[in-house]
Amino acid sequence: MNALRQWYEGLAPRERVAVIAGTVAVVLALFYYALWQPLNTSVADARVRVNAEAEQARWMLGVRDEARLLQSSGKNNSVKGRNESLLSIVDASSRENGLGQAVRRIQPDNNDQATVTLEKANFNQMLFWLRSLQRDYGIAASQMTVTRDEENGTVQARLTLTRGGA
């Protein structure tokens, strides 16, 4: 430290000002690039993540509300299709409700239960379809896994449909 001080005192006044200005510039650059910019970038990234999570939470709350609505809608006593097979009802009603292209697989589990796989299904159409299945045929989703798709408003879903309600 003594050698540095001697060197500094040995400089001309104009050189001292240049050394001080250079030191200040280096300290400011270090502060900006080592602290300020990374902190600013991480705050901006956190804001984007929070907004995305909030949007997903709003979407999930909407799904929850729709599921509760479907669950609470009473069963109609005039149920159609009592003698039709569950598979044919699911197939025909999915086509009627605009989900024919989205149905990838209908797998019977037993006489009164089937697992349906949907890909790129319009979420609102799927909810209307489920509601009409319950209202018109007494078929309800006893299990449901829904994943948001990349395309806005579409989902990937795996539904276990049961005749006689959930």
Image (spheres, helix red, strand yellow):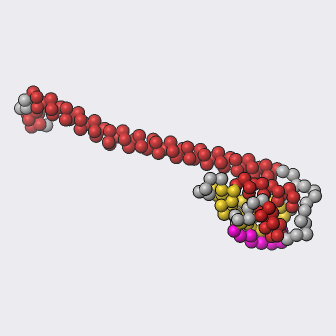
- Residue at left offset 61%, top offset 56%: 151
116 vs 62: above or below: below
Tell me where residue 146 sits by quadrant. bottom right
- Residue at left offset 71%, top offset 70%: 105
Tell me where residue 51 sits by quadrant. top right
| The N terminus sits in image quarter | top left
Please provide percent x and percent y for residue 115: 74, 67
Please provide percent x and percent y for residue 33: 32, 42
| The C terminus sits in image quarter | bottom right
Magenta segment, which residues? 104-113
Q: Is residue 56 magenta?
A: no
- Say whether residue 142 is visible: no
160 vs 14: above or below: below
Left/right placement of residue 29 relative to residue 144 reads: left
- Residue at left offset 11%, top offset 31%: 15
Task: Pick the residue in front: 83 or 27.
Answer: 83
Name the main secondary structure of what is drawn in magenta.
strand
Left/right placement of residue 17 relative to residue 135 reads: left
- Residue at left offset 23%, top offset 33%: 24
